[in-house]
Amino acid sequence: MSSTGNEPVITSYAQAPAKTISTRGVTYAYRELGPKGGIPVVFFVHLAATLDNWDPRIIDPIAEHRHVITFDQRGVGASSGSVPGTLEEAADDAYAFITALGYELIDVFSFSMGGMIAQDLVVKHPDLVRRLVLTGTGPRGGKDMDKVVGTTYWDILRATLTRSDLKEFLFFNRDAEGKRAAKAFVKRLSERTVDRDKAIGTKAFQTQLKAIQCFGRSAPSDLSKITQPTLIANGDNDRMVPSVLSNDLHRRIAGSELIIYPNSGHGSIFQYWERFAPVAVQFLAE
């Protein structure tokens, strides 16, 4: 650990301090780590997720070089208020949070629903974002995106019957390799032992699901507005946000890079973290 003044730089997400900031009547819970100064990397999390759902094997390598910020969306985890009914409103909330912290330029790392919110944010505020990482996600109005609701409820049932974590079904293939990766991922999420976040409530979760369904059924956004360097990643067998939608994003965002990992699903970046983390670090450093 290096230090600035007396304060050591925390580069382990398990030890990142929990903080809050209030703006426009909402108190947002967030964590930050890595060296301060420069452009921060703001992480946009997935459906039903709280601060505790980020894989430390992705966050920690980025935080070695960059100021990293993760946050709970309105109405989720330790953030106050209620979950907005649309992802466009969630993007407005994210904008309020980022500007309340005093930032005029950020990099974005997003996964799944977080990637949908990030797209809405960039389309509305193109000057706010320098570089964009979109993983396990798809465009507004993307084909079969609205089927995420049925897939999710089916997997909730399977997870309940097998007493497993829902993410083991939603994020990973059910072959030997996928099951191994799933167990390892879920185990890593419990590395933080103090000051953990509280889980999302059922109503908030259902509101998010409906918002994703609405996003999937909406008219497409003009993604030609996204001109910043963009890295897109997914697995070749994403049941949640179909893998073809990553190709669709790649076609619609000029100059974007696309990585499709073999024999993996929605959580491919967590299954292949050893390959993906260095790529993300390098992309964000450029």
Image (cartoon, helix red, strand yellow):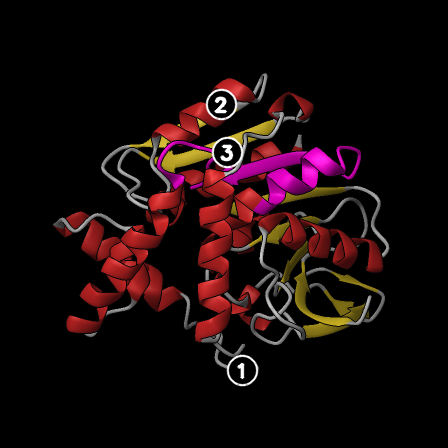
Residue ID for mark 2: 250
Dot 2 or dot 1, earlier in sequence: 1
Determine if the magenta segment contains residue 235.
no
- Discs 3/2, front: 3
The 10 Å Cα crowd at callout 3, few under 14, some 14 to 19, many 20 or more, is many
Q: Is residue 186 or residue 95 the one in the foreground?
A: 95
Looking at the image, is 61 positioned above or below residue 4? Answer: above
Q: Residue at x 34, y 65 (%)?
A: 186
The 10 Å Cα crowd at callout 2, few under 14, some 14 to 19, many 20 or more, is many
Asked if the residue under mark 1 is in contact with the one under mark 2, i.e. CB atoms within 8 Å, the reply is: no
Which x, y percent locates residue 214?
Answer: 49, 47
Q: Residue at x 44, y 57 (%)?
A: 209
In screen coordinates, is 34 left or right of 116?
right
**Label 2 secondary element:** helix
Q: Is residue 138 or residue 54 the one in the foreground?
A: 138
Q: Please report the bounds of the magenta region as a residue range.
A: 117-145
Looking at the image, is 156 positioned above or below residue 146? Answer: below
- Looking at numbered disc 2 in the image, what kind of residue is underneath it? His
Dot 1 or dot 3, earlier in sequence: 3
Asked if the residue under mark 3 is in contact with the one under mark 1, i.e. CB atoms within 8 Å, the reply is: no
**Label 3 secondary element:** loop
Quadrant assignment, res 69: bottom right
Residue ID for mark 1: 194
Q: Quadrant of the N terminus?
A: bottom right
Which x, y percent locates residue 138?
Answer: 46, 36
Quadrant assignment, res 83: bottom right
Looking at the image, is 63 positioned above or below residue 132? Answer: below
- Looking at numbered disc 1 in the image, what kind of residue is underneath it? Val
Residue ID for mark 3: 139
Which x, y percent locates residue 9?
Answer: 70, 63
